[in-house]
Image: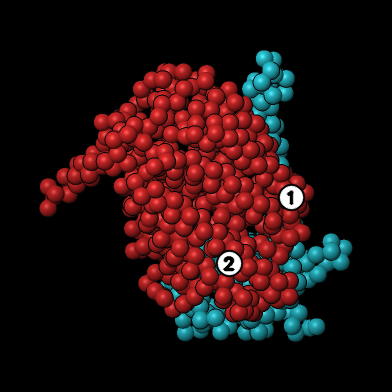
Chain colours: A cyan, B red
Amino acid sequence: MSANPPRWSSEDFWKKVAIWVTAGSFVILIVLTFDTLSKTSVGGQRVRSYSVINKEIDYRFDDKQNRYAPVIGNDAPLFGKPLSEAEAENLVDLGKKTVQAKNCMNCHTLLGNGAYYAPDLTKAWLDPGWISAASRETLMLAFLKDPERNARTFGSGRVMPNLGLTDEEAKGVVAFLKWMSAIDTNGFPHNFKTLNAQVQP
Amino acid sequence: MIYSVAALPHRIAGAFDALDSPHLNGGQQLAVRYLAVAVVLFLAQVLFGMLSGIQFVAPGFLHGVLDFNVNRMVHINAMVVWLLYGFIGSIYWFLEDESGTEIAGLKWGNVAFYVLTAAVTVVVLVYLLIQTGPGKDASIWFINEGREYIEAPRWADIGIVAVMLVFFYNVAGTFMKGRWSGIAGVLTLDLVALAGLYVAGMFYLTNITADQYWWWWVIHLWVEATWEVLVGCIMAWSLMHLLGARRKIVQTWLYIEVALMFGSGILGLGHHYFWIGTPDYWFSIGGFFSALEPIPLVAMVVHSVYDAGVHNFKSRNHPALAWIIAHTFGNFLGAGVWGFMHTLPQINLYTHGTQWSASHGHLAFFGAYATINIAFFYLAVQKWRGDVWMGGDLPGNGWKWKWALALLNLGVMGMTVALLIAGYEQSFVERAVGGSTWEGYFAAQNQVWFKQAMHWRLLFGLVTTAGVVLLVWDLLTIGKGESRKAPTLTKAA
């Protein structure tokens, strides 16, 4: 080994590189975080206001963006009752807390994150498994309150355990799922044919 | 009755006192306690992993008693906690050696250990016995936060932060009292980041997009940035200690790794922001920087193999060196290659939320973190027994450590490949063709290739379990009755 190693191989050089690279990356991350949080606040184009649960929601292929995107339609209040923004927020909040308290994420995925033992819930509100918009709310509530008797196992043998949801909690979960289905997830999941697409080809 | 309850802490502390050894310094006595709990939690991780694996094959198994979500949560939480215990133990182990002085506030470090261990016990008991709660804040505070990987209820989060502050005080205070080094500087700054990031996961948000945004700050910036740098520090010290590698070379490598790791890993965070509602500029940022993430891991392989080669593979502790080599290759393959395979958004659109992630997770956590902790278990047990011989010519030719190494690597690799096949099948059948509807999901789950893969995973899970049991047996017996001393290394500055 030479007595005078080149500067680029010295300990001191790499120490400085390490500090500058780390600090630089972190600063960029902070800037991007501010931008992302402002673009994903509730009520924007990406994450809709909670009162979107008063509307019809669909998920269709968008030619301009070349990917699937949520489509907000006419009035279609959840459980037939239009809610104010504050009421909608309370209901979605109850749903989100229930989803956390019941540990749903360790079987299901939400926005694709979680466990892989049960289906993704990102677009669960729009799933063709609920047959039609008319039957959906009743089927979802019945399933959430007694998943063992209303099991939807598709022949897999995996039955969701009864987690003892109250009526209000079950409604909250449905509201949360409906609200989540309106989030613009950059085209994930791809090729998802909603319950509406099955009726109107 | 009251008397016996009051005497309980004393009794538990007494049981841990049995771990003391006259050959260790104060920090190392504490380290052995951490490492011992780490081994117990490692066994718990494997046990609950097996229960979850069985449920994929036989869904009725323990239904309504210990459902999949409970088993899977305990499986992963036990892993996160045992790895942390291993890291903390390793750092307490070399703190006095690296700083040249006694640990500052060791008494508080000891108290923190008992507080943390008691908290972990209570959290696990609540997970197993109470499991879930009503949709109220109280559930999030006292039962389960319900956010994957960091499910610990909020009270425990606060306790964890308090314990981390004590740990940080021990580390920073000791270096300030003694001498600083390159390893000391990187380690101290890394611990600030590691503890600070945990706070990003400690609040509730209704907006799930913002919720998952911060949640990934904790998860990603821990395992793909600060943890990697932490094991870089542990490896740097271990290579000097094991092989007599020169400090100058080891520290230069450490700085290179920090530059590459943080340079790719911090913005590589973007690969978790493709599909959660965040803007689509994260496609380019996340795709590009996370594609660079394997580079520092290659550097680590070069580093360890180079150092081992320069010293002709002559080491003070053969099992530890073997596990360090397993660590570098496992880290590169599991975290680097397996991560890269599905990190680009074009591919991730179809692989996100499938068994691909489980495949990557198994190999990455084993390769990057379990291995280096196991290496440290061997380093610790050697000194604990009185710095005994752990080179070649062990009784029985060291069959136990060699078989444990082989079974664990074979078992984890087998699970990884089985899960990868399942993930491929899901990407095609569920994602591409089925469009991720529930029907598409179950079509993929019921497909014969998926089902076969789950059987293979279970089989290799059994191989892994056998490896862990053998490893624990070896750790309990290796060096027992050994009269030869470990060779002393001549340190070349």
Q: Is residue B168 left or right of residue A173?
A: left
Residue plotted at (80% across, 64% down): A67
Can see residue B218? no
Residue at mark 1 to residue at mark 2: CA–CA distance: 26 Å
Say the numbered circle drawn on residue B418.
2
For mark 1, name the chain.
Answer: B
Label 1 sits on what residue type?
Answer: Gly
Say the numbered circle drawn on residue B144.
none
Q: Is residue A195 above or below residue B105?
A: below
Query: Looking at the rendering, which quadrant does residue B309 occupy?
Result: top right
| Residue wearing tag 1 | B287
Residue B301 x/y as whole percent? 61, 41
Mark 2 secondary-structure assignment? helix
Residue plotted at (62% across, 84% down): A135
Query: Looking at the rendering, which quadrant does residue A165 occupy?
Result: bottom left
Residue B279 x/y as whole percent? 74, 52
Residue B256 x/y as whole percent? 65, 31
Residue sitting at the far top:
A3
Residue plotted at (69% across, 31% down): A21
Query: Looking at the rendering, which quadrant does residue B413 occupy?
Result: bottom right
Mark 1 secondary-structure assignment? helix
> In the image, which is nearer the foreground, mark 1 or mark 2?
2
Of callouts 1 and 2, which one flags the residue occurring earlier in the amino acid sequence? 1
Residue B232 x/y as whole percent? 55, 36
Q: Is residue B221 left or right of residue A45?
A: left
A62 or B94: nearer the viewer: B94
